[in-house]
Amino acid sequence: MAAYLIVDVDDLLKFTAEHGVDLQELAVALRGNAALVAGLYDTTNLKAVAIADWRTKLEGDWQVEPEAMFRSVGYEIFDADDRSCLPECLLEGLFRHDPAPISELILATTSLDLLPLIAKVNLTRNSRIRVWGADENMMTGVEYEDQVIFQLLDGLYGIRTKNVWVYIDFENISISLNEQGFVVNLDHLIERLVSQAKAHGKLVKMAAYAPWGQRGALPPLVDSSGREVAGEAPARLMMANIDPVFHLPGKQSADIRIARDVLTDAGHPEAGDVIILATGDRDFNDVINPLLQRNKTVIVWGVRGSTGRLLQSHPSLQLEYIDDFTDLQTHQSLSAVETERDVESFIPSQWSSVIIQFYRTSAIEDNGTITVDQLISQLLDARDVISRERGHDLVSQAISLGILQQQSAAGGISLNLQHPVVEKTLLIVNRMVRRVANTLSSRNWEYVNYGFLLKGLAMERDLDRPGMNENDQWRSHWIDCLVRERVLQRDLVPHRHNPDDLVPVIRIPITDELPMASQKGQDYADAADVAQNWQGVPPHQLSEKNAEVARMVTRIVVSVQQFTSFRNFAWCPLGSLHRRLREFDSGVVFQQAVEYLLINSMVTVNEYPNPRSEFNTKGVELDENHPYVAAVLAERDEFVQVLLQMYRNNITITQANLEARLPGGWDVPLWISTMRVENVLNPLPGRADQYSLFRTHHSVKLVAKDDVDEVAAAGA
């Protein structure tokens, strides 16, 4: 029985180059390991064959020709000038002359060219077939997958691959790429940096240095869809096994931190054989020379046009350009990138800062157009960028993206209100500011509790869009953004029930003009101011001024009356009332309706003792004796009476049938939807615009009084 080791030399040359493995060391290690796994006491009993196109000079700078080297360490040489028929050539030229069955067949290769040989050679019943390759997945789905014992080449005893340690001056690299006109696609850049590092050996350590978390310290970083993701950079780096190392903003801080870490790491026994410095800074010459003295291979990754001449001319360095092994887009092509996708969460970014600070500056100037310099100065004042250079980068990319529009050659710019990022940002800012302002005004509070604001924003229907208002974390991101941009102010105040405990609250800065607009640039008046204009106006006339608020007043009166009469309570929780009617609340309609009821003394809003909690609950109490309230409830009773009559006469309850039985002026859709919310009417499954009457409902029984039993009997 025979044991064979077949080494595909042509194929393994790439492996030796990528992993820094000496070809002779590889040849010796493969032969020794093959004899060991075959159970042979002596390597002379192993038939080791090195196959290659020996007639052609193999690529590489060789002190000893590979053919002579393989012969010297005990290999037979097999010439294969045509790889398309490699298995057949081996079978005819090698195995035909050895009729003994093979007990151990080992193929050292990183390709699949040799695998058909398995089905052609003469194997023993208990023979073992091994493949030594560079990729664990190379055997996946292959016909012989179950027959083969696979092992990684770099895991074989005696084969030492070069370890690669990478230190990335991310601040320097990202700024250099941006200055050379490239859009810094973070995901693409990470993938290419990792791939290039692995081409030099086994990647052991990778660290990226930048002032992470310092707003405006880096140029805009985007993902493949054009969404700005600078805030997510550390997390995305960690997912790629790159350690994000923080240093203070500034060139000198980065140089000192990286130099210290590189020299410290290089002194360890297990330090990398290949050290890669991703930077274009000439100051790293003081680091490179000590590394070279320790026999380290030093590679510098730079950006064309930004790499120091001393690094370019250093004789002992390998210089690779990041713009060569990446495929980054240019700023000119950024406008063609899809800016945002509805499936993604629309969270704050550097574009949010540009939009908010532009709007603030243009409002102060009372003009829809400002200059680039004015906007950059505002961004600096708000600490959205750390330097005028970074501000110019940010504004330039906002123009490329279409968020800002150039209006004049003198540097005049305007905000593109039709851009989806601008539209959504202004909508969010407007709704959040209005929510805080209305709450403070209507309740006469000095501040809004942070948790209370989160609950209120969750009920903002206009924010219910894909990627928006998803959860409290999303709302917290935007509240924090508005605090950073000085639109809102966050403070800590003592808890009202436990003064030793501080709770976060939100205020509106006294000195801020809050020039925030909706997506159409239209500002909304405060709910309390609007309600003042409705004092003394009965509900029937209110519809002429604001039909949506008038409908909400009707819904509130009916809902509160039903709740208090059924539960024998004096008041209804305001929060649960809003949740019940939320589907009809667009923006501040519910707030305005409550203000209208308060101004006209139809309701009282107070904090009431809650039997289910040790804390008080904000609630609303209805004055049923008020003539306006009585008028609304009288309409409710009349509508229910018509429903009862239709039920007795076996008439299908539809909008058309109701309109035929009610006098002109009735808002039938309003009353159908109100009765539906209160569970008096229920849609019939599969029948459009048809409803069933819940005849034993509490409100129906109140209206029917003694006739309810008669109605029930008639139904029976």
Image: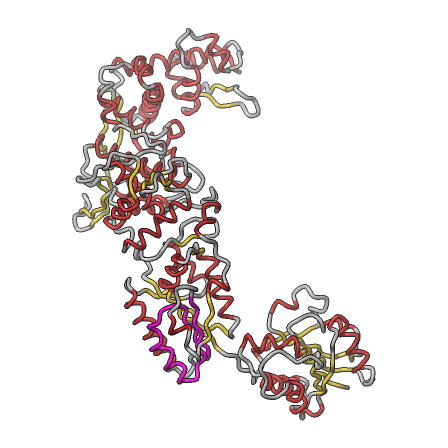
Is 91 magenta? The answer is no
Residue drawn at (25%, 23%) of the image: 530
Tell me residue 378's x, y (percent). 25, 46
State the quadrant of the N terminus: bottom right
Residue drawn at (26%, 40%) of the image: 361
Left or right: residue 430 versus residue 85 is: left
Count of marks overlaid on the render = 0
Q: Is residue 676 above or below residue 145?
A: above
Give the residues in magenta: 273-302
Tell me residue 309's x, y (percent). 38, 71
Left or right: residue 506 versus residue 399 is: left
Tell me residue 488's x, y (percent). 25, 42
Residue drawn at (77%, 78%) of the image: 90
Is 274 magenta? The answer is yes
Q: 395 and 573: which one is in front?
A: 395
Tell me residue 274's x, y (percent). 46, 77
Quarter assignment of residue 116: bottom right
Q: Is residue 141 above or below residue 109?
A: above
Q: 412 and 121: which one is in front?
A: 412
Coloration of the structure image? secondary structure
Quarter assignment of residue 606: top left
